[in-house]
Image: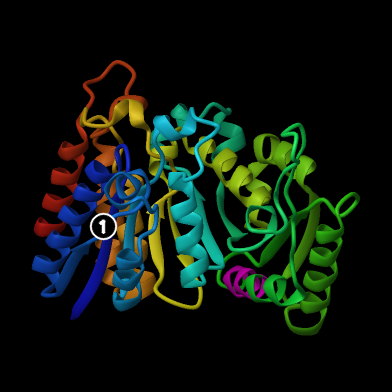
């Protein structure tokens, strides 16, 4: 199989973790007789520094012409710590999602038995966790207009906007996914306060009754859902929610595993699908070879499975990551007293596992 992959390392630890993911993909190429073409593009602070735009037109063209996108991370302290900055790295990510029509973000959360003691919660609470967050990605308060500041600078406003079409298309993905899992969708909203949430509940409930009645539908307010994620996370199967709630809850859910460096994600929609770790750019760790690349490597597995329908190849990557975890090949944030391994050590280990199995 010949496929073209747009590689966008981004900022901070992005280049390091993406390099290990590409290393593993090359091992897949060799082991399974495929040919992937990797073409690199700029995004985020690196792109701003180079050309003044966080998502240059050249990068967009590359993404549109590729079969899949492998993305690292975005963010830089020199912009984070400057409230007056008019151009920010994160604008590149939002623009990319909107330009490519990537309206559905899929974030699976699964506990590794070997790492269950790394979770901040008791083993009895997290042992059965196997959930996925389906987050609407191109609507809501992150994209709504109008937004801005008053002339005197003392007030600011953002607008949350959703249409029934946006809600229905993401809901279908959640219901179809639940049919292949445990058959439960939990809609998370704030329908007792927000008009947009009342529209969400209305559209999702009607769609459930008309087309997906074989799937169980629960509805939770977002504050309750946040509490349930730490008191009874095993109750969830597929969490369906809007953009900002999904951003917050999926990061909260990631902590259940013991490290945000373990969780991959995919973003799908109208054009080229994108695959990335859910964590940020971790600028404090950049260039130190200490960042956990497993989330990015697992994102490559989601890429092979979701974009190329290469299920055996994706399974080989997942088994390699699990073998590394089971044998204690871990980066510093997951190691207590034993030796910590480097970012490149883990990439080498998984690539070698694939080559030999």
Residue toward you, 137 or 133 = 137
Q: Mark 1 points at which residue?
A: 317
Residue occupying image coordinates x 91% and y 51%: 192
Residue occupying image coordinates x 48% and y 33%: 80
Query: Is the magenta region chiefly helix, strand or loop?
Result: helix
Please provide percent x and percent y for residue 224: 79, 41
Q: Residue furthest bottom?
A: 210
The question of residue 176 being in magenta is answered with yes
Q: Which residue lies furthest to the right in this view?
A: 192
Q: Is residue 105 above or below residue 330?
A: below
Residue toward you, 232 or 241 = 241
Indicate the quadrant where residue 299 lies: bottom left
Display coloring: rainbow
Residue occupying image coordinates x 45% and y 54%: 93
For the residue labelled by badge 1, is the local secondary structure a helix, a strand or a loop?
helix
Q: Is residue 326 above or below residue 22?
A: above
Camera sees residue 311: no
Neighbours of disc 1 within 10 Å: few (<14), some (14-19), many (20+)? many
Indicate the quadrant where residue 160 lies: bottom right
Please provide percent x and percent y for residue 101: 52, 72
The span shown in magenta is 171-178
The image quadrant where one finds the N terminus is bottom left
Residue occupying image coordinates x 23% and y 34%: 329
The image quadrant where one finds the C terminus is bottom left
Q: In this view, does 239 lie above or below 225?
A: below
């Amino acid at each position: 199989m010949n496929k073209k992959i747009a590689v966008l390392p981004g900022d901070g630890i992005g280049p390091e973790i993406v390099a290990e993911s590409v290393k593993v993909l090359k091992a897949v190429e060799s082991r399974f007789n495929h040919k992937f073409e990797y073409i690199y593009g700029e995004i985020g602070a690196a792109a701003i520094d180079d050309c003044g735009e966080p998502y240059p037109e050249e990068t967009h063209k590359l993404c549109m012409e590729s079969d899949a996108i492998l993305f690292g991370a975005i963010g830089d302290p020199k912009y984070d710590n400057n409230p007056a900055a008019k151009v920010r790295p994160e604008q590149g990510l939002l623009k990319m999602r909107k330009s490519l029509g990537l309206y559905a973000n899929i974030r699976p959360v699964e506990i590794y038995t070997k790492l269950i003691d790394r979770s901040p919660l008791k083993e009895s609470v997290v042992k059965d966790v196997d959930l996925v967050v389906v987050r609407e990605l191109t609507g809501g308060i992150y994209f709504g207009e109008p937004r801005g500041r008053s002339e005197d600078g003392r007030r600011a406003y953002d607008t949350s906007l959703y249409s029934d079409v946006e809600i229905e298309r993401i809901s279908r993905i959640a219901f179809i996914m639940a049919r292949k899992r445990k058959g439960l969708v939990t809609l998370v909203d704030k329908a007792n306060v927000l008009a947009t949430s009342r529209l969400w509940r209305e559209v999702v409930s009607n769609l459930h009754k008309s087309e997906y009645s074989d799937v169980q539908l629960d509805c939770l307010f977002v504050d309750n859902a946040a509490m349930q994620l730490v008191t009874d996370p095993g109750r969830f199967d597929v969490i369906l929610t809007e953009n900002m709630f999904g951003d917050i809850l999926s990061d909260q859910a990631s902590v259940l595993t013991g490290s945000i460096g373990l969780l991959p994600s995919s973003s799908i929609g109208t054009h080229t699908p994108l695959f990335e770790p859910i964590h940020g750019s971790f600028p404090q760790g950049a260039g130190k070879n200490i960042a956990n690349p497993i989330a990015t490597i697992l994102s490559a597995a989601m890429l092979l499975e979701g974009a190329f329908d290469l299920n055996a190849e994706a399974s080989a990557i997942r088994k390699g990551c699990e073998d590394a975890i089971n044998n204690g090949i871990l980066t510093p944030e997951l190691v207590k007293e034993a030796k910590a391994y480097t970012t490149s050590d883990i990439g080498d280990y998984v690539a070698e596992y694939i080559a030999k199995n």
